[in-house]
Amino acid sequence: MAGNVDSAITDFEAGLKLMPDNADLHYNRATALTSKGQHAKAILGYTEAIRLSPGLVPAYVNRASGFERLGERDKAIADYRKALEIAPALPLVRRKLQELGAD
């Protein structure tokens, strides 16, 4: 499976060379990086996806998760709250905020 993820990352990077302003490519590359445990790099990708597509709720949620894994609680809370601001019906996000004591 690791080979498939590495191959996907390579493909996303090739796509980004052609379409650097494609939020989905940044998001998908970041998701692949997350699956490899490369949370700091993934956060950069989610951040770029959000910059390009501010309503991309999954990018906020996944970036928040990455921040949590890196011990950056306040940043995680801010992203979870932003996700709820955009899409209020997200029970998983509400639960994460409760777990972080920020509900």
Image: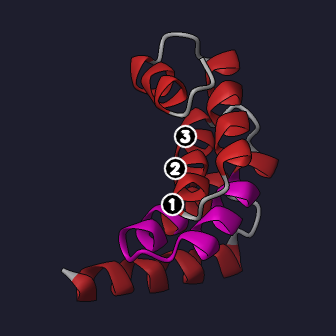
Q: Amino acid at mark 2?
A: Ser
User: Callout 3: few (<14), some (14-19), or many (20+) C-alpha neighbours within 10 Å?
Assistant: many
Residue at mark 2: 65
Q: Earlier in the sequence, mark 3 or mark 1?
A: 3
Mark 3 falls on what kind of element?
helix
Q: Position of residue 86 (x, y in %)?
A: 67, 19
25 with respect to 86 (left or right): left
Q: In the rendered structure, which segment of residues is drawn in magenta?
A: 30-49
Scheme of colours in the image: secondary structure
Q: Amino acid at mark 3?
A: Val
Mark 2 falls on what kind of element?
helix
44 with respect to 4 (left or right): right
Q: Is residue 45 magenta?
A: yes
Q: Position of residue 18 (x, y in %)?
A: 68, 76
Mark 3 near mark 2, Cβ–Cβ under 8 Å?
Answer: yes
Disc assigned to residue 61: 3
Judging depth in this view, the residue of 28 and 75 nearest the camera is: 75
Mark 1 near mark 2, Cβ–Cβ under 8 Å?
Answer: yes
Of labels 3 and 1, the one closer to you: 1
